[in-house]
Amino acid sequence: MAFLTGTLRQGRIGTGWRTLSELRVEPAAEPRLTVAEVDTALDTVSRLSGSGSAARHAEVLSTLLAGATKAEQDFLFRLLTGELRQGALEGVMVEAIASAASVPSEAVRRAFMLSGRLPSTASAALRGGVAALAEFRLELGRPVRPMLASPAESLAGAVAELGAVLVEYKMDGARIQVHKSGDEVRVFTRTLRDITAHVGDLTELVRALPCTSAVLDGETLALTDDGRPRPFQETMSRFGSTREEQVKALLLRPYFFDCLHLDGADLLDAPLRERNAALRGVAGEYLMPGTLEPEDPEPILAASLETGHEGVVVKALDSPYAAGRRGKAWLKVKPVHTLDLVVLAAEWGHGRRTGYLSNLHLGARDPDGGPPIMVGKTFKGLTDELLAWQTREFPLIESHRDDWTVHLRPELVVEIELDGVQTSTRYQGGVALRFARVLRYRPDKDAAEADTIDAVRAMLRG
């Protein structure tokens, strides 16, 4: 299950592209390698340390690859380098588990939300069916997979679709989930990573909340002196630092918007109206700004944007807490950002996109007349028709290629929808796109009419 979703059961094991590319191992002629043997080898690698570990590391991997066919070597290479994109995302695998174990997909989805780990969820489903899945409960100290919001076309449309709603600020912060049990506090990210050791300011704040036990969902962000949000990456930089000077310079401010447990009572299945009432009794000044059943939601959106935030989230008051976007009980409303950018290159796809040119390299126009300046990549939004068209047309304007990428003459313009931009040292222009997706190609525009790097930089908040 872990392999199919492109992850390792052991987490990071210190094996990257350079390590693997230096191993020259002839593939096996016939398939004989088992999943268990691969997992055992990765276990061995993950435990290696100290003097001589690098040589032993290479030896174990060489032995593993020697037992793999050419196709299996390719799979392992992409799995170990984080480049396995074969289409088996978590949503697909939830349905696959349900089918394999002959259990309702909703039972799998709920168990996955509570366990936070797809492999353990699959094991329970195959071992004991619905009864084993039902054994998963909310546990203090074990993070719950977060509920997410889906995009809405408009604020009025979101309110009309959901009926009785709560309208809250949508902040460009980092998602956090805090667990309090007495004086013990744990803080987790959206990906369920434990960052407690890096956010002492948050743990002290949560420890002082007026409750004995709680699980709260929210956002945290670093603020400027005038209370406006700092760039997203500055907030994220705190999650990996324990340096006292950085902690003091970038204090984190939480904004809680949901309560999943309070003083012994689990609230996951309670309607949002009830969860919000519990939250208001405990979050105090750290409550996410918003209004229950507003007569006019437009002023809330305007106030959010005016104070430097992204927009609003509209939430159905009768909805329970459910991981993922399924059901669309939460809808996010943000001003749409688009840019017209130049296609610089495309990478060959993986999985169901094998044989197609997929992942686009995107560039902004240099106003001084130089070549386009790269600002990001995306494969999102590409339909089957566009993939086929790209694969057919891109070689006609190819400048050169390597094993993975076809580089193009800077002629094509594509319209890209994005959440915003952030500063980045990865690209020459110093900025990178956030959550970019293809809307359409612009045959009515040539590269001289693409947006400039100055226009991209102007989208930086603050």
Image: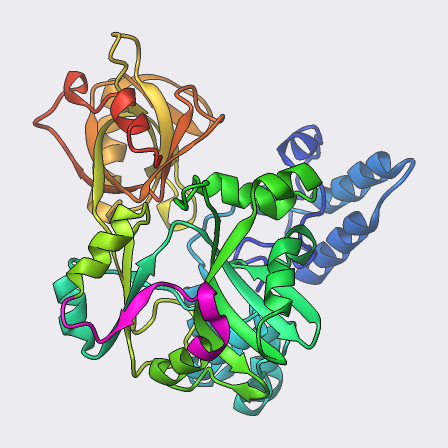
Using residue 360 as the reference point, say whether residue 287 is left or right of it. Answer: right
Using residue 459 as the reference point, say whether residue 424 is left or right of it. Answer: right
Specify the segment rendered in magenta: 280-296
Number of on-image labels: 0
Using residue 154 as the reference point, say whether residue 246 is left or right of it. Answer: right
What quarter of the picture does the N terminus occupy? bottom right
**Image coordinates for residue 151, horizontal then vertical, percent:** 26, 58
Seen from the viewer's position, the closer of residues 258 and 303 is 303
Q: Vertical placement of 119 versus 170: above or below?
A: below
Seen from the viewer's position, the closer of residues 59 and 32 is 59
Q: Is residue 189 magenta?
A: no
What kind of colouring is applied to the model shown?
rainbow
**Image coordinates for residue 426, horizontal then vertical, percent:** 48, 27
**Image coordinates for residue 141, horizontal then vertical, percent:** 65, 72
Snapshot quadrant of residue 119: bottom right
Outermost right residue: 51
Seen from the viewer's position, the closer of residues 144 and 64 is 144
Residue found 48% across the figure and 68% down from its top: 217
Q: Vertical placement of 432 versus 167: above or below?
A: above
Snapshot quadrant of residue 433: top left
Q: Is residue 287 magenta?
A: yes
Residue 109 seen in the current view? no
Residue found 41% across the figure and 75% down from its top: 322
Residue found 70% across the figure and 30% down from its top: 24
